[in-house]
């Protein structure tokens, strides 16, 4: 039966098909070896706290020589210096990704022999209670709280033209992708001291030494600290402590502040 919802779905599929065709034409026009990497997720994709990813959140195309991307630090750099963040786009819309990453022929050749993967990123910043993705600043990530894998083991060769990775609406998976790993502290960045931890109503409030940059709190029921990470807050380096409130999830917990 044809209905309005079917019409919307068909239109979305048509738009994506046109995007693939346009990207292929662009790659062909600019150079035979240029590649357009089309990334699609079924959605709704979510942050580690379970909330749907916000519009303009970022997805990243990454590369590793050995096929194992080791992850990100809080400033958006790869943990393993032999890995590479190839492209990042603030492309989330309505809880999912549907975007094209263009790779120049010279870049494809430079990264020949390695393996690509796609990650969902958490770049949220809490500015006085208003939470929004920080996204890209001058073309690069300024802050990264966490990340989750969308697709891995992607091989892109010279002359491929178009590569399509990630989920589609026909995927057997019923759930979207999810941020599941907190970004690691960047090397050489001093981490702040926790001044005090105070219960306040339904929250735990952590008071932190004010060092200029971005700070977030990784939390968990045990030392694995695997229960998530808060949106970052911006610190100005003044004498006033940074205050981050976290909803209570039990009678005890473990917390770690990560600054970049």
Image (tube, rainbow, N blue to C red):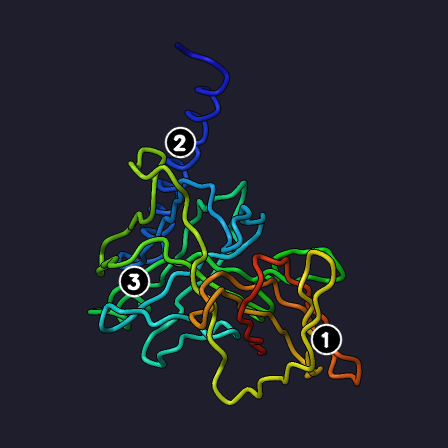
| Side of 189 relative to 59 (left or right) | right
Quadrant for the N terminus, please: top left
Q: Which residue is mark 1?
A: 242
Question: At numbered mark 3, what does the secondary structure look like: helix, strand or loop?
Answer: strand
Residue 81 screen position, x and y as percent: 36, 81
Return the residue found at the far top.
Answer: 1
Tell me whether circle 1 and circle 3 mark residues in contact (CB < 8 Å): no
**Residue at x-position 75% and y-position 79%:** 241
At 51% from the left and 57% from the top, the residue drawn is 58
Mark count: 3
6 or 107: nearer the viewer: 6
Nearest to the observer: residue 199 or residue 5: 199
Q: Position of residue 239 (x, y in %)?
A: 79, 85
- The residue furthest front is 251
In the displayed structure, would residue 16 be above or below residue 59?
A: above
Looking at the rendered image, the disc whose residue lies closer to the viewer, 1 or 2, is 1
Badge 1 or badge 3: first in the primary sequence: 3
Which residue is depicted at the point 64% across and 62% down? 246
* Res. 255 image quadrant: bottom right
Q: Position of residue 85 (x, y in %)?
A: 40, 69
Q: Name which quarter of the figure residue 245 lies in.
A: bottom right
Circle 3 is placed at which residue position? 116
Q: Report how far apart the C-alphas of labels 3 and 2 lie in the structure.
A: 25 Å
Q: Is residue 45 above or below residue 8?
A: below
Q: Marks 1 and 3, how far apart in space?
A: 38 Å
Secondary structure category for the residue under label 1: strand
Q: Earlier in the sequence, mark 3 or mark 2?
A: 2
- Identify the mark at residue 13; answer none if there is no mark: 2
Q: Is residue 210 above or below residue 18?
A: below
Specify the quadrant of the image occupied by residue 234.
bottom right
């Amino acid at each position: 039966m044809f209905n309005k919802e079917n019409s919307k779905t068909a239109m979305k599929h048509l738009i994506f098909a046109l995007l693939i065709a346009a990207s292929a034409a662009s790659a062909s026009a600019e150079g035979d070896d240029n590649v357009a990497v089309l990334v699609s997720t079924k959605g709704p994709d979510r942050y580690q706290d379970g909330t749907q990813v916000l519009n303009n959140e970022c997805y990243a195309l990454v590369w590793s020589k050995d096929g194992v991307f080791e992850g990100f630090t809080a400033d958006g750099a790869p943990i393993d210096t032999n890995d590479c963040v190839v492209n990042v786009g603030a492309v989330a819309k309505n809880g999912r990704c549907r975007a094209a990453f263009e790779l120049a022929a010279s870049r494809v050749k430079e990264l020949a022999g390695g393996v690509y993967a796609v990650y969902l990123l958490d770049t949220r910043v809490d500015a006085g209670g208003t939470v929004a993705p920080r996204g890209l600043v001058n073309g690069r990530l300024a802050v990264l709280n966490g990340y989750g894998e969308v697709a891995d083991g992607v091989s892109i060769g010279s002359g491929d033209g178009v590569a399509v990775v990630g989920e589609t609406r026909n995927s057997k998976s019923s759930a979207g992708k999810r941020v599941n790993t907190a970004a690691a502290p960047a090397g050489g960045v001093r981490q702040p001291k926790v001044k005090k931890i105070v219960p306040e109503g339904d929250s735990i409030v952590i008071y932190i030494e004010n060092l200029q940059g971005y700070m977030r709190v990784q939390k968990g029921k045990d030392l694995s600290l695997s229960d998530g990470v808060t949106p970052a807050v911006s610190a100005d380096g003044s004498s006033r402590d940074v205050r981050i409130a976290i909803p209570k999830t039990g009678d005890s917990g473990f917390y770690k502040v990560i600054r970049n």
